[in-house]
Amino acid sequence: MLPDRHPDMAVLGRADSVALDPHKWLYAPLEAGCALVRDEVAMRAAFSYHPDYYKFKDESDDRVANMVDFGPQNSRGFRALKVWLSLKQAGRRGYESMIREDIALAKRLYDAAIAHPLLQAFDCNLSIATFRYLPDDLDVDADGAETYLNALNEELLTRLQAGGEAFVSNAVIAGAYVLRACVVNFRTTNADVDAVPEIVIRLGAAVDAELRPDALKS
Ligand SMILES: *Cc1c(COP(=O)(O)O)cnc(C)c1O
């Protein structure tokens, strides 16, 4: 969708099938999963199953796409309705601007993490920024420092999630436990993102004061 998309995304166009969650970056309410397939006939051949008690009057009528033939689920609710309605309401351009904005917000948070002396930025890709709390008086080369940083950030994340001010998840990058902020809400603003470093630092300092082993105190 976006001309400045990550080059890795281009290979999606060569896939035979793509599974995605409209409840992620298509902003649908939970839950909506979706499979896009290139070859409808192969899909039907894989899943269509008609025991004696499961016959439809005119199976040769291909004007009707009976979804039972395209997956393991028989009875299903009309989850597609909410996805379709959003597509109609926002349109391609609406999605472009919402997704572009989410990417810019993640970049904004990543840049803030780079600039902040108590945060260590790791990576920024699509609308995900990863970083961790790094106390400035900790000798990162000391024995046990990395293990301690992992424990510190893990506990920080638990408190962050429980505290209700912000919700980020985690990732592990080359052994480092990091906070992973993923922006997939069109209501997220610059102010929301700008609030995150201060919250993380406040909680990080509190956890650090409680957990730091004596051997790592300066
Ligand atoms: C969303 C997500 C899941 C969970 O998938 P659901 O279809 O929402 O249950 C698992 N792993 C990753 C990386 C995800 O982004």
Image (tube, rainbow, N blue to C red):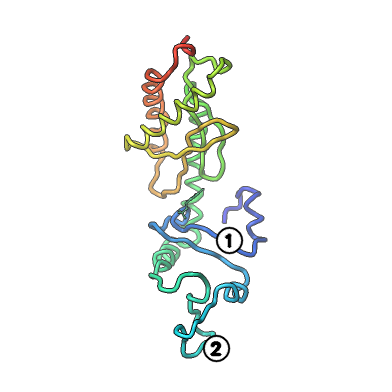
The residue type indicated by label 1 comes to: Val
Judged left or right of residue 81, residue 99 is right
Q: Mark 2 points at which residue?
A: 60
How packed mark 1 is, by other alpha carbons closer than 10 Å (few <14, some 14-19, many 20 or more), is: few
Residue closest to the eye, 74 or 35: 74
Q: What residue sits 46% from the left and 51% below the top? A: 98
Q: Is residue 111 above or below residue 97?
A: above
Quadrant assignment, res 46: bottom right
Element marked by disc 2: loop
Vertical side of 102 occupied by 140: above or below? above
| Rendering coords of residue 41 (x, y %) | 61, 76
Q: Whole-percent x and y of residue 180?
A: 48, 38
Residue pointed to by mark 1: 18
Q: Left or right: 207 with respect to 124?
A: left
Disc 2 residue type (three-letter) = Ser
Question: Measuring 47% from the left and 19% from the top, which residue is drawn there?
Answer: 135
Give the quadrant of residue 15: bottom right
Q: What element carries label 1?
A: strand
Which corner quadrant holds the N terminus? bottom right
Find the residue positioned furthest to the bottom: 57
